[in-house]
Amino acid sequence: MFDDLKGKKVLVTGSTAGIGLEAARSLASAGARVAIHGSRSADAAQSVLEQFDGGSDVAYFQADVRSSAACKALVEAAADHLGGIDVLINNAGGLGGRNGLESIDDDFFDQVLDLNIRSVVMVTKYAIPFLRKSAEQSGETSSVISTGSIAAREGGGPGASLYGGSKAMVHNLHRNWVKEFTKDNIRFNTVAPGTIDTAFHEDKDQGTRDKISGTIAMGRFGSSAELAPAYVFLASHAASGYVTGQVIDVNGGQMCP
Ligand code: NAP
């Protein structure tokens, strides 16, 4: 239906596992040149690179995106390797642990917000010049896609108030950036997963998983592969060139109150 992702330069943060890895694999299969990223060592990422189709143009970059300096270095290294950036996917994130309000201390606060907010703000900030140049040179939109969450709307599970709040901020930041950067032909959208079967849920026993499944209309967790097409759609100018400032929920009918 569309083939404009061929040769596109894409940076996907948090793409060594789960949702980010499947999104990166789908984009590479569509012909994009993909910079994948995580905090693990290059040696540890070898087995990740092996999960891409033969012939994929993919390279790994290591950075702990809780640090602004590391975000800057990551964007510069990826852009240097790719020769620019046409599409940025901010997917790195996570719970960072669980703490009820009365147990939250400064370290936990910084850990959750640095991982889910600083990373998105700083990686996007440093990518903007490349995305602007991409749009100028191609005459098409460039695209920023971030991974939000159903938690942004329903508050998050036990001990995850800062996580849910940080994802709500991710959703909202994008609507602001639409106002700032649409003149530069950069689009900003969010994919909001429901409950997806990744390492994110490895702290849950079967009883808890069954209980959560009971809140989902489809009665089961989703898979990362079921998320990936949403990123591919939003990355493609041909498919979504008039879509910006939106949150796409992919959640099997898990409703928010
Ligand atoms: P996952 O399998 O644990 O993947 C997390 C990814 O983020 C990994 O590639 C990891 O790479 C990277 N990462 C984590 N901390 C990092 C750091 N400090 N610096 C650099 N990279 C880091 O989890 P997932 O479920 O796919 O989560 C992906 C995104 O979806 C997250 O933003 C999460 O909040 C969101 N989400 C997930 C669900 C769900 O149900 N699974 C629901 C809503 C939203 P390394 O291991 O190499 O560090």
Image: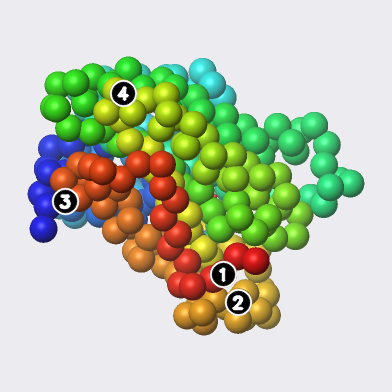
Q: For the C terminus, which image quadrant?
A: bottom right
Check if mark 2's residue and mark 3's residue have beta carbons within 8 Å: no
Who's the residue at 47% across and 66% down the image? 251
Name the residue carrying label 4: 183
Residue type, numbered disc 2: Thr
Residue type, numbered disc 1: Met
Which label sits in the foreground, 3 or 4? Answer: 4
Check if mark 1's residue and mark 2's residue have beta carbons within 8 Å: yes
Position in image of residue 102 (x %, y %): 89, 46
Which label sits in the foreground, 1 or 4? Answer: 4
Who's the residue at 75% across and 38% down the image? 108
Instruction: Decide if ligand 1 comes within 8 Å of the CB at mark 2.
Output: no
Which label sits in the foreground, 1 or 2? Answer: 1
Check if mark 1's residue and mark 3's residue have beta carbons within 8 Å: no
Q: Nearer the viewer, residue 1 or 54?
A: 1
Q: CA distance from mark 3 to mark 4?
A: 28 Å
Name the residue carrying label 1: 255
Name the residue carrying label 3: 30
Q: CA distance from mark 4 to mark 2?
A: 41 Å
Residue type, numbered disc 3: Ala
Compare marks 2 and 3 and give the one earlier in the sequence. 3
Looking at the rendered structure, the secondary structure element under dot 2 is loop
Q: Which mark is residue 86?
A: none
